[in-house]
Image: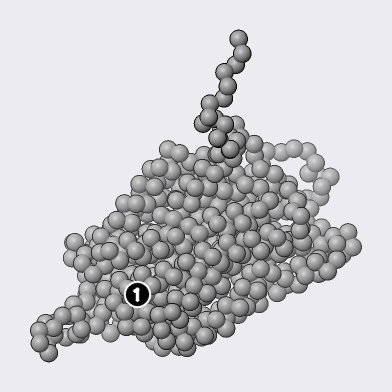
Amino acid sequence: MPRPSLPVGGRLCLFSRDRWYRGFTLVLTFLCYTSYHLSRKPISIVKGELHKNCSGEARHGNHSIFDNDTSCDWPPFDKANYKLLFAALDNSFLIAYAIAMFFSGMFGERLPLRYYLSVGMLLSGLFTSLFGLGFYWKIHNIWFFVIVQVANGLVQTTGWPSVVTCVGNWFGKGKRGFIMGVWNSHTSVGNILGSLIAGVWVSSAWGLSFIVPGIIIAVMGIVCFFFLVEHPEDVGCTPPDHQEQLEHEPLLCQELEEEEGDLGHLTPSGEAVGGSASSHKEAPSAISFLGALRIPGVVEFALCLLFAKLVSYTFLFWLPLYLSHVGHLDPKNAGDISTLFDVGGIIGGILAGVVSDYTGGRATTCYVMLITAAPMLFLYNYIGQSGLATVIGMLIVCGALVNGPYALITTAVAADLGTHKCLKGNAKALSTVTAIIDGTGSIGAALGPLLAGFITDWNKVFYMLITSDTLAFLLLSRLVYKEVRCWCGYTARQRGCKEI
C-alpha cells in the first residue's frame, strides 16, 4: 500500500529538527535575559519621583500646596545629598554584581544551567519586588533599599554566563556575530520595556514599578525551568563545530610564536600542553580562572569592556534623571525618551555583529565604533538639548556607538574566546570566560554611576564618559594592529599569526 502524501502543514515546515531547537533556544534565552534587564531598569525611572522639584507639582492660585521644594519627595531622598544616596543604591547592586560575577561563571560550569538560571530568576523576582514593597510598607531607611540591592546584584549574576553558554552550546562560529548581535538586543529591549512598565506607575504608585517587573522575571524563571535545553545532544541534535573556519579568518590573530611562544593546548589548570602530549582523548573538564585568563585576548577585551560598560551603565542609571533636570521633563517623559538610547543600542549591536562577521575583525569593529563615540558624546553634551529632533537623533547615534562594542564583546567575542582552538574543542571554558569579561566590565559599570553621583556638574560627567571611551579603544590597539597585519597578508605560516 503506498504511503500517504505529506500533509500541507508538513510541506510548509521549512525547518529541520536542529534548526527548530536552535531557534527555540535563541528565543527562550532572549526572553530570559530581557526579563533580567527589565527588572534592573525601574530604579533609574523612579529616581525622578523619589526626588523632584515639588514646587511645581500642584498649585492653588500662585501658591504651591506643598510646604517646600522637597515635601513631596520620598525620605531619605529628600535631602541635599540625594545624588549620593542614589549612587549608593546603584553601586550596592553593581559592586555586588561585579564581585559575584567572577565566581558565577565557575558555578555555571559545574551546575546544571537550567536549574542555576531558573533559581536565579526566581530570586531576582523576589528581591526586585521587595524594593517596590518598600513603598507600601512605608520604609524610609536607606539600609533596607541598599541590602535589597546587594542581594539582587548577587543573584542577577546567574543570568549572563548561563544564557551565553547556552547559545554558545547551540551555535558554532559561522555568522555568530550577526546572530548574537540580533540576540543581544535583549539588553536594549529589556531596558525599553523596563522603562515603559515602570513609567506606568512611577507618578502614582512607584512600588508597582518594581513589583510588576519582579513578577515578570519570576514567571520567566518558571518557563526556563520547564523548557530550556542546555545541549543539542540532550535532544538528539547535532552539536555545532566550534572550530569552523570563517571565510575571512584574520580574527584577532597574533604573532604568538614570536612574542609568547606556542600556546598549544590549555589544560583546566591553565598549563600549555603541546599537541603530541595531548593527543589522547580526555573528557572535557571545567577550566580554572587563571587558565581562562591565559586564553589570548581575554585580558584586553575584559579591560576594554570595563571602560565601555562604564559609559553604558552611566547612561542606563542616570540618563532619565539627566533628561529630567537638564531637559526639564517629568519622570515619565524622561524615562520614555531615554529608551531611544537603547533603540540605538539595538542598531549598534546588530551592525557590529554584521561588520565583524564579514571582516573577521572583532577588535577593529569595536575600535572604530568606540573612537567615533567620543566626539559624538562631546556633541551630545553641547547640542543634545537644543530640540526634540536633536535629542532623538543624538540619543540613537550615541546609543549605537556606545552599546555596539559592548554588545559585541559580551556575546560573539566572549563565545569566540570561550571556544578558542587552544582548548581543543572543550567548550567548558565558555561560562568562565564570559564571567571574567562581563565581571571586569561590571567593575566599570559600578564605577560609572558612582562617579556620576559624586560629580555635581553634568558637563564633567560627560568629560568622564569621553575619557573612559578613549581608554576603551586604546586598550584594543594591540589586537587591532595584529588584525590589520593579517589583512595585509601576514599569514600564520609567515609570521606566526594565530587565531585568538
**In the rendered image, which residue does mark 1 sit on?**
334
Q: Name the image quarter holding residue 474.
A: bottom right
Query: How does the figure colour the protein chain or chains?
Result: one colour
Tell me where residue 78 appears, x and y as whole percent: 23, 79
For label 1, the crowd category at 10 Å Cα-Cα, with few meaning under 14, some 14 to 19 and many 20 or more, is many
Residue 287 appears in the rendering: no
Residue 303 relative to residue 450: left or right: right
Secondary element at tag 1: helix
Residue 339 appears in the rendering: yes
Tell me where residue 290 appears, x and y as whole percent: 64, 58
In the rendered image, the residue lying farthest to the left is 60
Tell me where residue 263 appears, x and y as whole percent: 78, 57
Q: Name the image quarter holding residue 498.
A: bottom right
Residue 283 relative to residue 25: left or right: right
Please tell me which residue is depicted at 81% across the width and 50% down the height of the picture.
Answer: 274
Placement of the N terminus among the 4 image quadrants: top right
Please tell me which residue is depicted at 74% across the width and 53% down the height of the picture.
Answer: 246
Residue type marked 1: Ala
Counting labels gives: 1
Tell me where residue 161 appears, x and y as whole percent: 53, 53
User: Who is closer to the viewer here, 335 or 434?
Assistant: 335
User: Who is closer to the viewer here, 116 or 37?
Assistant: 37
User: Who is closer to the viewer here, 397 or 282?
Assistant: 397
Please tell me which residue is depicted at 63% across the width and 69% down the height of the picture.
Answer: 366
Please tell me which residue is depicted at 50% across the width and 59% down the height of the picture.
Answer: 185
Q: Is residue 281 above or below residue 130?
A: above
Placement of the C terminus among the 4 image quadrants: bottom right
Q: Name the image quarter holding residue 124.
A: bottom left
